[in-house]
Image: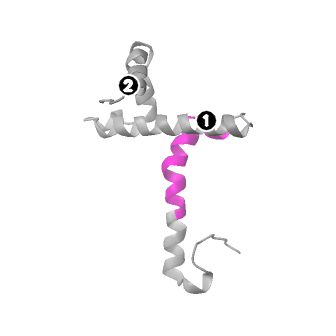
Amino acid sequence: MRVALVSSPPPEKLNAPQWLCANRQSWGIENGLLQRLDVSLHDDRCQVRSPNELWILRMFRRLANCLFMAWRSRQSKPQYQSNTDFQFALGEDNQAKAMGFVTCKRPKL
């Protein structure tokens, strides 16, 4: 069985525990932001192919993720901390608040 791992230092500079640590760190990226983008914002299903459109869409998706993380950090009840809860909180009744938040110069959550 072969396992591949891309790392900054050359292979001869890493011992077994360092390889394991590098492998775990790479999965931390996937399990953090990328998982939220894939699951909540359906990033993997995106049909956009134009480089400019992709760049803009990714920028807005990351903005949405940043807004979610700021909202989540202020929630007192842990059961209401998913991206779906955030989307529901900014539903039809709160669209004006959301747009005001995004467009103002000094937003307050």
When asked about the image quadrant of residue 54, the answer is top right
Left or right: residue 17 versus residue 70 is right
Check disc 1 and give the amino acid type.
Answer: Ile
User: Is residue 40 in view from this perspective?
Assistant: no
Left or right, 16 with respect to 107, comes to right
Q: For mark 1, what is the residue?
A: 56
Quadrant of image for the C terminus: top left
> Mark 2 or 1 closer to N-term?
1
Q: Which quadrant of the view contains residue 48?
A: top right
Which residue occupies 63% across, 40% down? 55
Query: Residue 2, percent across and down?
Result: 70, 74
Residue that protrudes farthest toward the front in the picture: 105
User: x, y percentage for residue 29?
Assistant: 51, 56
Query: Viewer-proximal residue, 93 or 76?
Result: 93
Q: Is residue 35 magenta?
A: yes
Q: Secondary structure at mark 1?
A: helix
Q: CA distance from mark 2 to mark 1?
A: 20 Å
State the residue position of label 2: 104
Residue 21 position, x and y percent, is: 48, 72
Where does the image place residue 45, in percent across and percent down from the top left?
A: 67, 36
The reply to whether residue 53 is visible in this rendering is yes
Q: Determine whether 20 is above or below 43 in the image.
A: below
Give the camera-side residue of 10 and 83: 10
Numbered label attached to residue 81: none
**What's the magenta bit mostly, secondary-structure-wise?**
helix
- The residues colored magenta run 26-45
> Residue at coordinates 54% horizontally, 62% vertically from top-left?
26
| Position of the N terminus by quadrant | bottom right
The answer to whether the residues at label 2 and label 1 have Cβ atoms under 8 Å apart is no
The kind of residue on which mark 2 rests is: Cys
Name the residue at 50% across, 47% down.
33
Closest to the observer: 88 or 62?
A: 62
